[in-house]
Amino acid sequence: MQNKRLIIILLSIMVILMVPFFAMQVSNEVNWTPSDFLVAAVLLLASGLSIEFALRKINRRKLRIAIVIAILFLLLIIWAELAVGIFGTPVAGS
């Protein structure tokens, strides 16, 4: 079961990254570089593995849910900052 979840995580990352890849093929509005794909893959992999670790190691259901929500929130905040620079940090190129 544990290896199955890891495979699901990796396949999910590939599917998510295929969206901008195919969008680049049909539109000039999406313009990702290889480094953009690399950063997105690392961010998604780190989030997926962190969630998997939390699911394996934490037994209390409410705490597990809270940690998974926190990881997803952090993922979305970092993704938004890298994409459009919501907070204006140097990470976003501002």
Image (cartoon, rainbow, N blue to C red):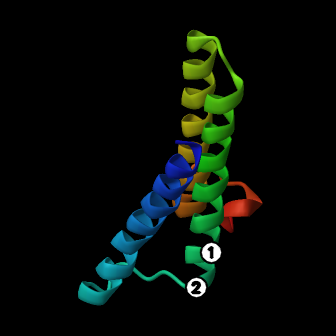
Q: Is residue 77 above or below residue 42?
A: above
Percent coordinates x, y for residue 85 in the rendering: 59, 57
CB atoms of marks 1 and 2 within 8 Å: yes
Q: Is residue 64 above or below residue 31?
A: above
Q: Is residue 17 visible?
A: yes
Report which residue position mark 1 lands on.
Answer: 38
In this view, which residue lies farthest toward the front?
A: 1
Q: Which sits in the foreground, 24 or 61? A: 61
Percent coordinates x, y for residue 26 in the rendering: 24, 86
Percent coordinates x, y for residue 91 in the rendering: 73, 61
Q: Is residue 80 visible?
A: no
Which element is circle 2 on?
helix
Q: Which sits in the foreground, 92 or 8? A: 8
Which residue shows up at 57% across the image and 11% down it?
A: 62
Neighbours of disc 1 within 10 Å: few (<14), some (14-19), many (20+): few
Which residue shows up at 58% across the image and 66% down it?
A: 41
Q: Which sits in the foreground, 61 or 83? A: 61
Q: Which mark is residue 84?
A: none
Q: Which mark is residue 34?
A: 2
Q: Quadrant of residue 29?
A: bottom left
Kind of residue sitting beneath label 2: Pro
Which residue shows up at 55% across the image and 75% down it?
A: 37
15 with respect to 63 (left or right): left
Cα distance in 3D space between marks 1 and 2: 6 Å
